[in-house]
Amino acid sequence: MRERYCRVCGGWHQLDAWPHNCMPVKNLAQSDLPAPHFVSDSIEIRSMHDGQHYTSKAKLRRAYRSAGVEEIGNEKPRPIEKPKADKQGIRKALKDAYQQHRA
């Protein structure tokens, strides 16, 4: 016999004899059919580039690409290239500062 904690009444029930009054309330607006999440193409937006109204994300991006405009916010971040440190220059500056301090 296996038991599981009931979130409805706070008690423990056997899995094969779960009481009817402790069944979770079903949301009637939610379907039992599995469905993937999808992103719609429709949008109501005014382009910042040309001022026209667009109802499709694809058409807006096509207009951006044809004008050579880069849309920001959806791109992958580029790696930041750090400049190489000039170790000899740093040592020379430290030596100069030390000598000025001693003088």
Image: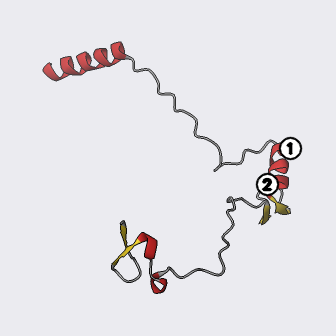
**Left or right for 90, reference 60:** left
Q: Which mark is residue 49?
A: 2
Q: Position of residue 28 (x, y in %)?
A: 64, 81
Closer-to-camera residue (28/97):
28
Q: Residue placed at 85% from the left, 50% from the top?
A: 63
Q: Position of residue 77 (x, y in %)?
A: 58, 40
Closer-to-camera residue (15/31):
15
Closer-to-camera residue (98/62):
62
Q: In this figure, which residue is indicated by the disc labeled 1? A: 66
Q: Is residue 78 above or below residue 63?
A: above
Q: Residue placed at 85% from the left, 54% from the top?
A: 59
**Left or right for 81, reference 69:** left
Q: Which mark is residue 74?
A: none
Pick out the residue farthest to the front. Answer: 1
The amino acid pointed to by label 1 is Ser
The amino acid pointed to by label 2 is His
SS class, disc 1: helix
Q: Is residue 86 above or below residue 47?
A: above
Q: Is residue 53 above or below residue 7?
A: above
Q: Residue placed at 68% from the left, 72% from the top?
A: 31
Q: Is residue 43 above or below residue 12?
A: above
Q: Position of residue 71 (x, y in %)?
A: 71, 48
User: Within the image, what quadrant is residue 100 found in?
Assistant: top left
